[in-house]
Each structure stands twice: as C-alpha cells, then as structure tokens.
Amino acid sequence: MATSIAQATKPQEFPADSPVKAADARRELRIVERTAALFRERRQHALRRLDRAFAWLMAGQWLFAILLAVLVSPYGWEGKVKAVHFHVYLAVLLGGALTVFPAALAVSSPGRALTRHVIAANQMLWSALLIHLTGGRIETHFHVFGSLAFLSFYLDWKVLLTATLVVAGDHLARQLLWPESVYGVLNPEWWRFLEHAFWVVFENAILVLACVTGLKDMLRAARQQAEVEALTRSDEMKTLALEMALAEARRR
C-alpha cells in the first residue's frame, strides 16, 4: 500500500520544451505536494481521534470487568456458590494495568505507530481477561472479533497482525496450561485453537482489504481537494491579472 501511495503522489514528468508544458509541470508538482500534505494531515487526525476513543473504551472495559468479577465470575467458576475470590483482584489490578498504559500513550503520544500497536495488544489481552472472567463462555469470544473490527478503523494492517499474534498466543498458551479458562472445559479438542485461529484469519482477510481500500479512498479525496484548490488558485490569479490589466488600461 505504501508503494501505491508513493506512486500516486509522484509528480509526472513533463518535457520543458514549451512554457505551457513547464507551467503544467509546476502545477502538477504543486498538486502532488499538496495531496501528500492533506493525506498526512487527515491520516494523523484520524489516528489521534482513534487513540483517544480506545482510551475511553479501555476505561469502560475496566469498569465492565469489575462488574463481571463481582456479579458473574463467582457463578461462572463456583456454580451456585457465590464467593468473592481472586477474580475481583484480577479485574481491578490486571484490568487497571491494561487500561492505564495504553490510555497514557493515547494522551501523551497520539498518532504514533507504537501507540496503536500497544492499544491493539492490550485490546486483545482485554478479550482474554473477559473470557477468563466469564469462565470461558463461548459468547465472550465474540469480543475478539469485535475488537478486530474496531482496530481496523486505524486502516493499518500491521495493527491487525499485532492483535492476531497476541490473541493466538494467549489461546495457545491457555489451551496448554489452563484450558478451562479459555474454553470452559477441562479437556477441549486439540484442534480447538486452530478452529478459533481460522475464523480470526478469515475476518482479518476482509479487514485488511477494507484497510487498503480505505487508504486509497483517503488518498483520492486528498488529491481531489488539492486539484480543487489548484483550480481555485488559478482562477484567482487570472482574476487578479485581469484586474491589474484593466487598472493599467485606465491609467493610460
């Protein structure tokens, strides 16, 4: 995608064997430079806005996890015996760690690649924590797919890769060490991890396509605005030249 953007913003070469072609070349160069500037401005604005949105989402998930630990986890793990155990502390302490660090980055370094990759990793760890707090309920796994969809708003396929590696590593490790915390059963099928990974990859294939398309649309919109600005500037220059010519004619 970076190659296509570079090609789209590369100025066309015109032979400077006439004033008209030289003027066209300068105009095209200005349009390309303005397109690149507009694209960077809009991209950064979108990234910063998403970083802040995920900071609020992390805070909301933290509160939700604490409620789950208090109201749902005792039943999910102890049956009808309601007991406040380490899940409450897990939700408060681990949930706090998963919230504070990415939120701090979103405030101090919005728009940076490191910030969105940290957010992606922590969002997947949030999925893991919520799955654990509900005793491995299959419905809670939908949080993974919803999170991937939200992360695709960054229009950066590398963010999806980070998120996929984190959630795949979590599922594999817990299937080997503590399968009940991720699948809700003590002895899941050995291929259960592969089944979940397949659907994650399936969603990612669609989301990556959406990211590429979204970047192309953003670049196309920037180009169109740059062309409109260039046309407006050209009209203004023509109007100014005409007014100057009329003023000179009156003085004569």
Image (cartoon, rainbow, N blue to C red):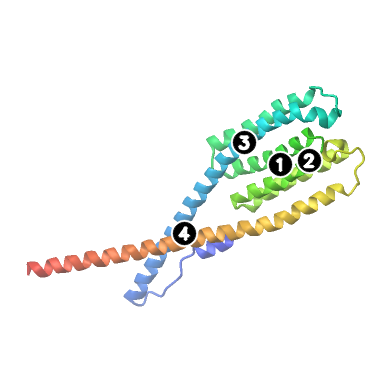
Label located before the other in sequence (1 or 3): 3
* For residue 85, side relative to residue 63 (left or right): right
Q: CA distance from mark 4 to mark 2?
A: 40 Å
Mark 3 highlights which residue?
Answer: 102
Q: Position of residue 89 (x, y in %)?
A: 74, 24
Q: Residues within 10 Å of mark 2 (few under 14, many from 20)?
A: some
Kindly identify the residue that appears in the image at 70 percent across and 45 percent down: 163
Q: Please provide percent x and percent y for residue 37.
A: 45, 54
N-terminal label among 3 and 4:
3
Name the amino acid type tagged 3.
Pro
Q: Are marks 1 and 2 in contact (CB under 8 Å)?
A: yes
Classify residue 93 by image quadrant: top right
In 3D space, how far apart are the residues under numbered discs 3 and 2 (Cα atoms)?
Answer: 19 Å
Tell me if label 3 and label 4 are in contact, CB under 8 Å: no
User: What residue sits right under mark 1 in the picture?
Assistant: 124
Q: Earlier in the sequence, mark 4 or mark 1?
A: 1
Element class at badge 4: helix
Q: Amino acid at mark 4?
A: Ala
Q: Which residue is mark 2?
A: 170
Q: Secondary structure at mark 2?
A: helix
Quarter holding the C terminus is: bottom left
Residue located farthest toward the front when viewing the structure as drawn: 80
